[in-house]
């Protein structure tokens, strides 16, 4: 028999329960050494330290891995309500390089149509990997402090 757990009604408890369930199956984030720093309804902060096997031929963090960090935060923020959600599109601006040993941080913050640019046609969350927590209109990346 399986133990059926009740679905939390408190939004914060629900976000935490969804995060725990997703994390248990998120082999990519685990393999990359990501750590979930915080999660809540429509928001998530995730960190990753750049390892030697994550740098490219320029000896900087591979952009695809920075994108993966931002996308991971986005996934945890969007799914915090226990509704399966995936991204249909995303863009990223690389504003600084990540180097081996740097800890990168991505924070995803839910937005509504009222917050979105005029060209946005559906509710979305934004993910931004930054030096410090903030929200933004697109995904960007740089080392955390």
Image: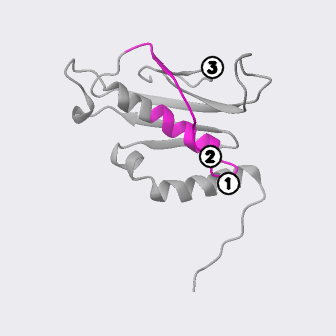
- Is residue 1 found left or right of 24 in the rendered image? right
Distance from Cα at disc 2 to Cα at disc 3: 19 Å
Pointer 3: residues within 10 angstroms few (<14), some, or many (20+)? some
Residue 96 appears at what percent x and percent y?
Answer: 40, 14
| Residue occupying image coordinates x 57% and y 86% | 1
Q: Label 3's element?
A: loop
Query: Is residue 47 toward the left or the right of residue 73 in the image?
Result: left
Residue 8 percent coordinates (x, y):
73, 61
Task: Identify whether 37 is placed above or below 136.
Answer: below
**Which residue lies most toward the top here?**
95
Residue with the mark numbered 3: 137
Residue in view at x 45 percent, y 43 percent: 35
Residue 116 image point, x, y percent: 72, 21
Q: In this figure, which residue is indicated by the disc labeled 1?
A: 82
The disc placed on residue 106 is: none
Name the residue furthest left.
Answer: 57
- What residue sits right under mark 2 in the picture? 85
- In the displayed structure, 37 sits above or below 117; it is below
Q: Quadrant of the C terminus?
A: top left
Which secondary structure, mark 2?
Answer: loop
Question: Of circles 2 and 3, which is in front?
Answer: 2
**Is 59 part of what is drawn in magenta?**
no
Mark 1 residue crowding within 10 angstroms, few (<14) / some (14–19) / many (20+): some
What is the spatial separation of the Cα atoms under label 1 and label 3, in whole angstroms? 24 Å
- In the displayed structure, would residue 45 be above or below residue 144? below
Q: Quadrant of residue 117?
A: top right
Can you tell which quarter of the image residue 133 is in? top right
Q: Nearer the viewer, mark 1 or mark 2?
A: 2
Identify the residue at image location x=65%, y=32%.
125
Residue 70 in the magenta stretch? The answer is yes
Q: Is tag 1's residue or tag 3's residue first in the polypeptide sequence?
A: 1
User: What span is colored magenta in the figure?
Assistant: 69-96
């Amino acid at each position: 028999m399986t133990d059926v757990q009740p679905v939390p009604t408190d939004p914060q408890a629900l976000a935490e329960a969804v995060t725990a369930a997703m994390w248990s199956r998120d082999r990519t984030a685990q393999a990359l050494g990501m750590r979930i720093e915080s999660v809540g309804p429509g928001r998530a902060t995730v960190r990753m330290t750049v390892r030697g096997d994550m740098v490219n031929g320029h000896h900087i963090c591979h952009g695809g891995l920075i994108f993966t960090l931002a996308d991971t935060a986005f996934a945890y923020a969007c799914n915090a309500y226990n509704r399966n959600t995936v991204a249909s599109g995303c863009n990223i601006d690389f504003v600084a390089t990540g180097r081996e040993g740097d800890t990168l941080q991505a924070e995803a913050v839910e937005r509504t149509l009222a917050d979105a640019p005029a060209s946005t046609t559906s509710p979305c969350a934004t993910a931004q990997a930054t030096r410090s927590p903030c929200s933004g209109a697109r995904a960007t990346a740089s080392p955390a402090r």
